[in-house]
Image: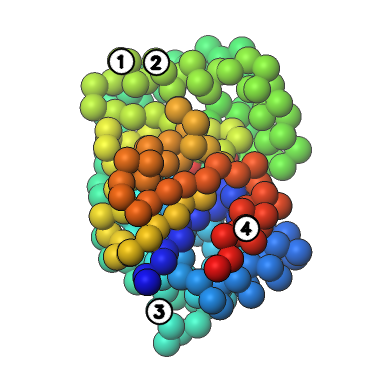
Amino acid sequence: MNKIFIFDVDGTLTPSRLKMTEEFKKFFSEWSKKNKFYLVTGSDLPKLQEQMDFMDIESEGIFTCCGNQFWKPDPSIPNTSAELIYENKFELPKHLEMFLNIVLNQSPYPHRYGNHIEDRGSMVNFSIVGRDCTQEQREEFFEWDIENNERGRIANIIKRKARGIDAVIGGQISIDIYPEGNDKSQVLKHIDYDECIFIGDRTEQGGNDYPLAKLMEETDNCSYYQTEGPEQTQQILESLID
Ligand code: M1P
C-alpha cells in the first residue's frame, strides 16, 4: 500500500515563517524515516530553506509557490540541492498592479516596511505591512488584521474585479495571487498513491489550503485534516500510526 502524506509548511510543520521547533523536529525526523511525504507551501524555495533543513528530512518532493513550482531533492548532494521539475509562469496584469499600489497607499494600517509586491515568477505575494518587517512588526500586523479583516476584504475585491485571478490568505501578513486553478489542488495529479492524506492549517474557505482540502474530500482514498499548528500535527500523525 503506497500511503502518501502531503504537508503544508507554515502553521502546520513550523510556526509561520519560523523554523521547526526542536521538539517537533525530533518527532518529525523519526516519523519521516517510516513514511513518505510531499511538502506544499505558498512560499518559494529560498524561504523554505530558511525554515527547514528539509533535505535532511527526506521528502518525495517539494511544491512551492502554491504548487506552481515542483522540486525534487537530489539525494546525491544531500542537504543542498533540488532539481526544478516544472514551473508555471505568471505575470501580474498591469491593472492589478495599479490596484495593489492604490490599496497600499490607502490602507489605514499605519506602518510600511518594504517589499510589498513580491513577484515569485509563478505567483505574486502582496503585503500591506511589507515582507521586510521584523517578527515583532509581523505579529503586530497579524493581530490588527484579525480585528480588521483587511486581507480578507482585499482578497475578495481582487477575486471579484480581476477576471481569472485568485487571491488567498496563506500566512500572517500577506495574500497570495495567481491564476484561477493554479492553487495547491494542482499537486495531487503529480502524486502516485493508493491512499493520500493532506494536513494544512488554512483549509477554511479563502485560505490557501482550501482548494487542496476540498479536492481531497471529493477524491477516492484521499482525506485531509485541519491543524492549529505543529503540536496538533504531531497528535494527528500519532493517531494515524498503523
Ligand atoms: O506558506 C504560507 C505563507 O507564508 C508566507 O505568508 P506570510 O508572510 O503572510 O506569513 C508567504 O510566503 C505566503 O506566500 C505563504 O502562502
The nearer-to-camera label among 2 and 4 is 4
Q: Secondary structure at mark 2?
A: helix
Name which residue type carries label 2: Ile
Residue at the (52%, 46%) spot, across then down: 225
Of callouts 1 and 4, which one flags the residue occurring earlier in the amino acid sequence?
Answer: 1
Of callouts 3 and 4, which one flags the residue occurring earlier in the amino acid sequence?
Answer: 3
Residue 230 visible, this angle:
no
Q: Which residue is mark 3?
A: 74
Gap in angstroms between the C-alphas marked 1 and 4: 43 Å
Q: Give the side of residue 177 with respect to residue 22, left or right.
A: left
Q: Residues within 10 Å of mark 2 (few under 14, many from 20)?
A: few
Gap in angstroms between the C-alphas marked 2 and 3: 41 Å
Query: What number is the disc on residue 161?
Result: 1
The x and y percentages for residue 219 are 31, 46
The x and y percentages for residue 62 are 42, 62
Q: Residues within 10 Å of mark 4 (few under 14, many from 20)?
A: few
Residue 206 picture quarter: top left
Name which residue type carries label 4: Ser
The x and y percentages for residue 226 are 55, 42
Q: Secondary structure at mark 3?
A: loop
Query: What number is the disc on residue 239?
Result: 4
Of callouts 2 and 4, which one flags the residue occurring earlier in the amino acid sequence?
Answer: 2
Query: What number is the disc on residue 157?
Result: 2
